Image (cartoon, rainbow, N blue to C red):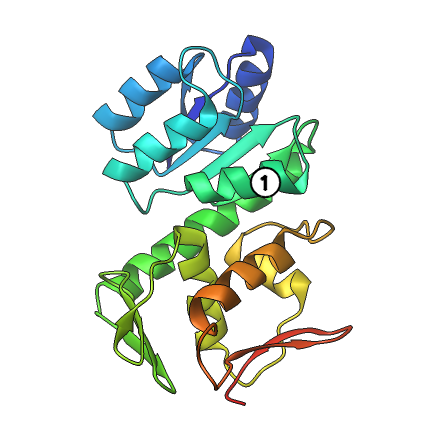
């Protein structure tokens, strides 16, 4: 597995490189956003770790640019900024996970393994061309197209992934912890970013429809069902 680390703090970058190399990963370093972009677009990597605040091209803009060419590559953002708004901005830019500095290296390794494992599973699913349907809602896992009552619904990558997971686990209560781990590949459910995204999804999926599909179970989580 080949990992690209884009981190402007040389000491931090080299520590990450050392730890990952000892675990058997091949690691390439970039110390600014411009070099990170050049490397990311010129080589094939299995995963990218990037800082949010970078010289020349910041992490948000860089993540968006990488996503245009590599929509499915796993990206983890490393940053000292850990508010809900910061996380939502990172996820909206296309990041799969968000790790706040300082972090335990064992947690970083666990998240890398989880992301790579899920990405391999998704690639297998995409190749089968599955379409998920529930009531009058349909999503195409290959084209990322979503329709309700034959009307297109435009979702961000994270909203799509959240909807896909909820549809795949319909009629079952999903806790915030489960959603954080399965959709965001993060073990952090302490902030309210999950509730924020549920509300985003509700406005796009349920608004103007008499039958609601996304429901809250107070004190338990959320459930995807008719009624």
The relative height of residue 211 versus residue 46 in the rendered view (above or below) is: below
Q: Name the residue under label 1.
A: 87
Residue 105: give x, y in percent of width and height. Answer: 64, 33
The single residue placed furthest to the bottom in the displayed view is 227
Residue 182 seen: no
Residue 166: give x, y in percent of width and height. Answer: 49, 72
Residue 11 seen: yes
Quarter containing the N terminus = top left
**Mark 1 crowd level (few <14, some 14–19, many ≥20, 10 Å Cα):** many
The single residue placed furthest to the right in the displayed view is 219
Q: Residue at x 52, y 68 (%)?
A: 202
Residue in front for this viewpoint, 147 or 19 = 147
Q: In this rendering, would 186 be left or right of 72?
A: right
Quarter containing the C terminus = bottom right
Q: How many labels, in total?
A: 1
Q: Which residue is drawn at 53% across and 20% down?
A: 53
Residue 45: give x, y in percent of width and height. Answer: 32, 33
Residue in front for this viewpoint, 129 or 206 = 206
The single residue placed furthest to the front in the displayed view is 208
The relative height of residue 13 versus residue 121 in the rendered view (above or below) is: above
Quadrant of the rendered structure where residue 161 is?
bottom left
The relative height of residue 200 versus residue 217 in the rendered view (above or below) is: above
Q: Residue at x 67, y 61 (%)?
A: 177
Q: In this rendering, would 32 be left or right of 19?
A: left
Q: Is mark 1 on a helix, strand or loop?
A: helix
Residue 28: give x, y in percent of width and height. Answer: 39, 21
Q: In this rendering, would 132 be left or right of 6?
A: left
Q: Residue at x 34, y 14 (%)?
A: 35
């Amino acid at each position: 597995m080949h990992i690209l680390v884009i981190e402007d703090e040389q000491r931090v970058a080299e520590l990450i490189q050392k730890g990952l190399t000892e675990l058997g990963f091949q690691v390439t370093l970039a110390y600014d956003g411009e070099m990170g972009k050049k490397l990311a677009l010129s080589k094939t990597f299995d995963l990218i770790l990037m800082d949010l605040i970078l010289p020349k091209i910041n992490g948000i803009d860089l993540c968006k640019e990488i996503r245009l060419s590599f929509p499915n590559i796993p990206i983890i953002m490393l940053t000292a900024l850990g508010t809900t708004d910061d996380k939502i901005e990172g996820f909206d830019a296309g990041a799969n996970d968000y790790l706040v500095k300082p972090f335990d290296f064992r947690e970083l390794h666990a998240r890398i393994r989880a992301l790579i494992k899920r990405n391999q599973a998704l690639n297998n699913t995409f190749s089968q061309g599955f379409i998920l349907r529930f009531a009058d809602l349909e999503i195409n896992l290959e084209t990322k197209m979503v329709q309700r009552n034959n009307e297109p619904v435009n979702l961000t990558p994270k909203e799509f992934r959240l909807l896909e997971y909820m549809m795949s686990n319909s009629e079952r209560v999903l806790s915030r912890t489960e959603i954080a781990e399965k959709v965001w590949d993060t073990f952090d459910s302490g902030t309210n970013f999950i509730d924020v995204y549920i509300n985003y999804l509700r406005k796009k999926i349920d608004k103007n429809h008499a039958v609601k599909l996304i429901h809250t179970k107070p004190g338990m989580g959320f459930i995807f069902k008719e009624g």
